[in-house]
Amino acid sequence: MDKVFVLKLAFRNLINNRMRTILTLMGVIIGISAIVVLVSFAFGLERLVTSEVTGGNALKLIDIGTGSSNVVKLNQDSINSIDSLAEVERVDSTINAGAKIISDNNSVDATIYGTTANYLDLSGIIIRWGEGFDESEDRAKSPREIIINTSCATFLGVDPEDTIGLEKDFVLTIPKEITETDSGKEVEKTSYKIVGVVKNDESPILYTFIDNLKLDGAINYSQAKATVVGRGSIEKVRKQVENMGYKTEYVGDTISQIEQIFAIFRIILGSFGLIALIVAALGMFNTLTISLMERIREVALFKILGMTKKDVRFIFLVESSIFGVLGGLIGVITGILIGVIANITLNFYAVRSGGEPVAIFYYSPWFIILIVIFAILMSLLTGLYPSRRATKVAALDVMRYE
Amino acid sequence: MLGKTSILAEKNQKIVSHDCIIEAKELSKNFLVGENNIHALRDVSVKVNATDFLVIYGPSGCGKSTLLNIMSGVDTPSKGDIIVRGTNIGKLDEDARAQFRAKKMGIVHQNPSWIKSLNVYENVALPLIINGTEHNVAYKRAISMLKELEIDNFANQKPTQLSGGQQQKVAIARALVSNPWIVMADEPTGNLDSTSADEIMSVFHNLNKAFKRTIIVVTHNQSYWSVGTSRLEIKDGKIIKNIRNG
């Protein structure tokens, strides 16, 4: 039978009972949009938390350290060995040391990292004011360059942006496992020029080019980050590095834990939406059954005029799937709109109170496609009983008694 | 009304007046009403020729509508055979009977039923669409059919807005639109005034005379007894008179 005709007929029937159609459709729209809003919220939160943990390219990174071992050393030779592994793209390292910031007879303890710009980038450390340090070969450069955090700026009593270009004195204490001496090394007071500020108020932290600490006597590294060619190489490279005697950590371990927690969170939130959708499905079932009862004489007429059971079923399934398609699409659009409005409102207040704008809702394309398919399947399932019942209408009895 | 150039003249099978188009052999139909077994038809045997205008007459409840329903394949006999142009339609399943009916038969009821959301020409086009014709082609043919019956000015109205006589003419248009072999009408004039009823009967008469369609009309109105070329009188599920050609 002509499919276009069946579609037109279904729309006419729905339009003829406008109010009932709108109310039924609204039920589906509310159910679908509730699921979209709640699950997108769970997705958004997960992404926020995950991006906090991982930073930029963290899923391709392996953190390498010596753990508590006094025997295994992380030095230039070991870095070269790791770097030479087939699936390792590059290795960046860092040296941790203690430092004292001296300003106008006051001083504060800080942690200093001798590192590279790439290591900072991989660690997700963003320079908010100023620029990074010079990594050129010119080691005699004076004064040395340093990046501070906002906690140091507070100690210095200067606004972060105004610290750029200031020269301050620092006293460094390099631990013995780095210098390979009996008691480590206290480096005499050295002047550093502040070239950048990182936003972090927790405790004073400093970053300088790794070669500066090497000049001060550092031989070993505290940690390294190996960038592998892809996520698939992580396990293999980890094993190879661990076989060299080093400890490895991978942020993906944490991510999979986060993902597990949020999967449960999504299911819980999605279940709330599902309840709304089940109520909508019951409403739809009711509408379709009443519609069949009202049009039972029409069904009988179709059969007397020669319509097969398959075509009768098709007419009713088309009608029910219209609820699914329209309800699914409008529900998704409504859900996204609600999320966008909620996000804009939230960010408005967040920015006003000094926070940063964030995306609380994330609309995963596969989830959106899945939810529309789900709505259509649900509508077809709901239409199954009324359509089956329509095929069983005894045309002659209906014509005789209805 | 129904001129020589009618679309009904496209009939594709060669009509020979003595061709037997329907043969009922010892038909019986029983209904179980509560605990009572009602015998609506008892061993009814009848032959209908291709050019017949058969009037089935009898009082209410005599079994004449049951016979018509079995002839059209809407119902099946409890016993016996109903053969339409060589096909024993009583042995076909529901869908096969429906498809057979859609292609070969046009049916008119006492109270015509409509698809309420469709207008007149769309309702008339239904049998063609059910047969698999594309809806725009079916609509064109439906409008031509309405023109033939001179009721095309109602084409865009809803059927329920029309008078009883007009509705019955639209129902005839719907029965004829797929150019069937046989047109069956169950009390087509039952709810009409005498003028409209005569008009409807003259349409059937014309169909039979000019276009050689097999017409079977069930009526309890004795005044139409003489309209048919063949007459069948039924009482208590049995044929009591079977008069052929006058």
Image (tube, coloured by chain):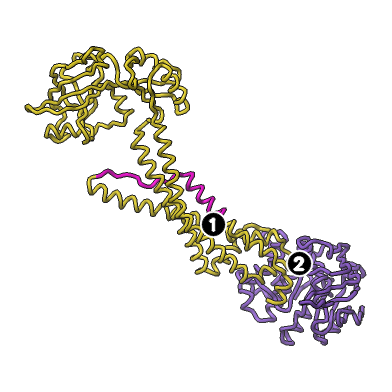
Q: Chain of mark 2?
A: B
Of B21 and B176, the residue lying toward us: B21
Reply above or below: A167 against A43: above
Element on which disc 2 rests? helix
Segment colored magenta? A355-378
Instruction: Please provide percent x and percent y for residue B23.
Output: 89, 69
Q: Which chain is yellow?
A: A
Residue A312 located left or right of residue B79: left
Q: Which residue is mark 2?
A: B7
Which residue is rendered at x = 67% and y = 62% of the image?
A312
Q: Is residue A5 visible?
A: no
Q: Chain of mark 1?
A: A
Location of the N terminus of chain A by quadrant is bottom right
Shade of chain B as shown in the rendered figure: purple
Number of callouts in the render?
2
Q: Position of residue A383 (x, y in %)?
A: 60, 60
Q: Secondary structure at mark 1?
A: helix
Question: Which residue lies under the disc numbered 1?
Answer: A324
Most foreground residue, A101 or A361: A101
In the rendered view, would you say A254 is above or below B47? above
Residue A37 located left or right of residue A280: left
